[in-house]
Amino acid sequence: MGKYFQEEIETASRETIEQWQNDGLLDVVKRVYENVPFYRKKMEEAGVTPDDIKSTADLPKLPFLTKDDLRDAYPYGLLAIPLKDCVRIQSTSGTTGKRVVDFYTHADIDKWANGCARAIVAAGGTEDDVCHVCYGYGLFTGGPGLNDGSHKVGCLTLPMSSGNTDRQLQFMVDMGSTILCCTPSYASYLAESIHERGLQDQIKLKAGIFGAEAWSEEMRHDIEEKLGIKAYDIYGLTEIEGPGVSFECQEQDGMHICEDYFIPEIVDPETLEPVPDGQIGELVFTSFAKEAFPLIRYRTKDITYITREKCKCGRTHARIHRLMGRSDDMLIIKGVNVYPSQVEEVLIKQGMPANYQLIVDRVNNSDTMEVLVEMTPEMFSDKVSAIEKKEKDIVSALKSMLGIYAKVKLVEPKSITRSEGKAVRVIDKRKI
Ligand code: DLL
């Protein structure tokens, strides 16, 4: 295996990529207009027909699609083919509102696996590797996606799924896992557990493919240092396809979008107008290559910016910058905009593990924020005075970063719940 999984596609000229996207857009608009009453109605309401769409330059004429639309159309309302031709569903965990379900044909699964295989090869993976997948398996896309990608590359695949850290570490040591696929928060938890048990010398990991939740550059360095690996970011969402929509290469300088399957746009989340490359906004996708469940102009709510400059790795597909938050996870506390990633940055700079939770509340009409932070096992045995001092240091570091006071409480190691591998970073009691 060389540097790329599909060299010709991954290094195609921008003209070729644009041609794929123009052809793909015309095809998908016609398909949904003819086969999906939900879409036809939306397009009719927007006064647009397939004849109005000649190239990606006409995208702004098409209506957006949101998670609420997917919920309204649940379960079959956005299917573009007969149900009998679908072979798989995947779904979100549905912790907020109704589940979102995505359908796949054989061809859809094959393309998804290509995206994940490209990510694994970009992280240095070959058929000699042992790929340890501890994203959840099941309705969640993480496990199945990386699993299929790992098969395509020809790695020995360990379908571990999430949880049971003892078993994860035993297999990691016994099988000599070289590539670790999981959420960054679980990777840092595994790193701590490896150090606690003194297993560093028995671990053969060289790379990690981490995604499914926001993480910072500081957290990347922390994990890389603790595990002695290179840590790569991978992005995706259930509605579009799960992991492998975009992924980092050896340059670790933004995630390449599989542009032969998806058309990315960045729009201003307020005005919904497209913004130029390099400008921050909300990521929007058109999944034109999907047979079963193609989405047009789906608003991800994820905030980032895009670049179409050729990458040093030789790939030509556009890159998105590490995600900077969600247009809906920004907290407004006492009128100040706070992103959980800013808190994470402070904590890591203070030498804390990145396992934390923000509890936001409203007391006597005033917003409050409490930051629970897990201690390392070493800190846990420190004197109370040392712990109190650390809490004070974090309070003042947060104050200078955010400009507001947040109460800080250091809690026992591993006492903050991890659900489905994804960390629950914010509990906003104001909404309850
Ligand atoms: O999290 C798919 C996935 C699995 C991606 C494994 C990467 C690895 P959902 O559960 O539908 O799908 O959640 C999608 O998670 O809109 C982002 O807000 C967030 N997210 C996903 N990847 C990243 C990332 C999977 N690399 C939502 N950085 C997305 C930051 C991410 N946030």
Image (spheres, grey):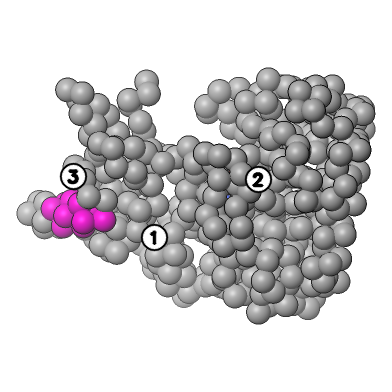
Q: Quadrant of the C terminus?
A: top left
Q: Residues within 10 Å of mark 1 (few under 14, many from 20)?
A: some
Q: Give the SS element for disc 1.
A: helix
Residue 296 location (% of width, % of height): 76, 39
Secondary structure under tag 3 reads loop
1 or 3: tag closer to the N-terminus: 1
Residue bounds of the magenta highlight: 390-401
In the picture of the structure, the residue carrying the numbered disc 2 is: 284
Q: Residue furthest left?
A: 385
Whether residue 196 sits left or right of residue 244 in the image: it is left
Q: Is residue 32 magenta?
A: no
Identify the residue at image location x=36%, y=50%.
Answer: 355
Q: Which residue is mark 1?
A: 192
Mark carried by residue 1: none
Name the residue at 28% across, 37% down. Answer: 335
Neighbor class of circle 3 (other Cα within 10 Å; few <14, some 14-19, many 20+) is some
Disc 2/disc 1 C-alpha distance (Å) = 36 Å
Q: Which mark lies nearer to you, 1 or 3?
A: 3
Work out whether residue 90 or residue 178 is closer to the camera in this orientation and state it: 90
Determine the residue positioned at 82% across, 71% down. 13
Q: Could you give the CA–CA distance between mark 3 and mark 2, rounded to whole angstroms?
A: 35 Å
67 to 317, vertically: above or below: above
Q: Which mark is residue 405?
A: 3
Front of the two marks 3 and 2: 2
Residue type of the residue flagged with mark 2: Val
* Circles 1, 3 touching at the beta carbon (< 8 Å): no
Residue at 60% in and 22% down: 98
Q: Is residue 390 in sight in this rendering?
A: no
